[in-house]
Amino acid sequence: VSADAEEPDIVHRLRNQLSVVISFCELLLADMPKDDPRYADLLEVQNAGRTALNLLPELEPRVR
Amino acid sequence: MSSVADATAGGERGATILIVDDFDANVRLLERLLRPQGHRVVAAGNGEDALQQVRAAQPDLVLMDVMMPKLNGFDACRRLKSDASTRLIPVVLLTALQDSDSRIRGLEAGADDFISKPYNAAELQARVRSLLRIKRYTDDLESAEAVILSLALTIEARDTTTDGHCQRLAAYAATLGRALGLGEDDIAALERGGFLHDIGKVGIPDAILLKPGRLTRDEHEAMKQHTTIGDRLCGGLRSLRTVRPIVRHHHERLDGSGYPDGLKGSEIPLLAQIISVVDVFDALTTDRPYRAALPHDAVFEELRREVAHGWRSGDLVDAFVSLVSRDELPRVAARKIS
């Protein structure tokens, strides 16, 4: 990832988007009682976000 | 226990934090994490905007993405850290986890810390708290130094016959230091020393300091104490450690007949010797109530007489005389205290 590039690459942009999804989930989870029926759903969203984030290094060589 | 913890945490509330990121959702996320901590948040969309916002909002902390259009985070950080008026503001670079290249480049640019995306809320808040605490300490130190500098100018203002003496001394000593090839740290010490060398006069009674006639032996002894008083005053500030030898030893003489410690020859710190030479020059080339300013030639003669007496270094005096003869001393306007 080159920081000098005027336009950030697709991996960088995806990482930014996924980081926002994961972090906002964390904020919502922190405010929500664990027995709330939506708690588990939100956790699913956050876990999916983390999984996608962890896939990014695999994507990196393919978009170069 | 909890009240102490609250008070400590409370000290870091209400700070201004600049968030720099071209990705709006990231800015909103950081705002969401920092506003509940009681901080004011301002935002910029790229490095160039960030430099403007730093000037306008004077933030206590900058959180900055590295990859941005116009001016990237590394270059913006480097600019903030190379400017004396902004280099004490902590800069945190927001990088991807395990991006060690970015961290190395960030360190080289002077970044104070890194925070990885995605953020861990608790870690982010803890780091921000810790950096704001350090910022507050440096602010306190800076203001302590500013107080001492104002004090020095106040002392000068007590004696209207020496108006502008500190500014001239700082400028002359730095010029002589550069001519001698000294490093930037020494030049900075000479500039501060020019202002602070007589700081200890704050402890000398007006009746002695402003006495128009000749001082009695006892009065002269009291006056001599301004060197040790000044050294003590500067002693509490780490940032003034390079200036203390100047404050204490600017009245020493090479033959050991000076004060306060009667140091001889090379025992006298070079920077103190430099201040001492330019101090004599400035004193003799300005009007005093009891005599008019002397012409340069007469002052050179006096300095050379003091070299012959074994008081001063001939090399230093020669270097200074040649600067003055080549008209290379800066012109300094007196600065008034309002």
Image (cartoon, rainbow, N blue to C red):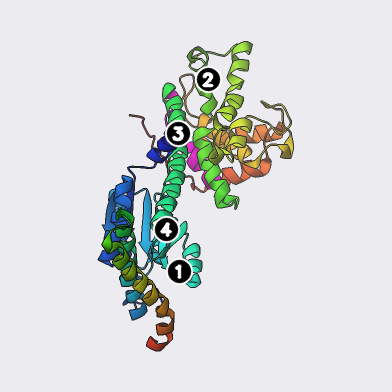
Which residue is labeled 2 in the image? Answer: B203
Residue B31 sits in which quadrant?
A: bottom left
Identify the subunit bearing mark 2: B
Residue B3 sits in which quadrant?
A: top left
| Cα distance in 3D space between marks 4 and 2 | 44 Å
Which residue is labeled 1 in the image? Answer: B97
Q: Which residue is at a point 39% across and 62% down the rendered structure image?
A: B119
Same chain assignment for discs 3 and 1: yes
Horizontal side of residue B36 vs B266, given as left or right: left
Q: Is residue B11 above or below residue A28?
A: above
Nearer to us in this view, B93 or B175: B93
Q: Are marks 1 and 2 in contact (CB under 8 Å)?
A: no
| Amino acid bearing label 1 | Leu
Mark 4 or mark 2: name the one nearer the start of the chain: 4
Q: Secondary structure at mark 1?
A: loop
The stretch of residues the image draws in magenta is B160-177
Q: Secondary structure at mark 2?
A: helix
| Amino acid bearing label 2 | Gly
Identify the subunit bearing mark 3: B
Identify the subunit bearing mark 1: B
**CA neighbours of label 2 inside 10 A, class few (<14), some (14 to 19), many (20+):** some
The image's mark for residue B4 is: 3
Q: Residue B174's spot in the image, x, y percent? A: 52, 45
| Cα distance in 3D space between marks 3 and 2 | 37 Å
| Amino acid bearing label 3 | Val
Disc 3 versus disc 2: nearer the observer: 3
Which residue is labeled 4 in the image? Answer: B92
Q: Are marks 4 and 1 in contact (CB under 8 Å)?
A: no
Q: Which residue is at a point 46% across and 58% down the rendered structure image?
A: B113
Horizontal side of residue B273 vs B21, given as left or right: right
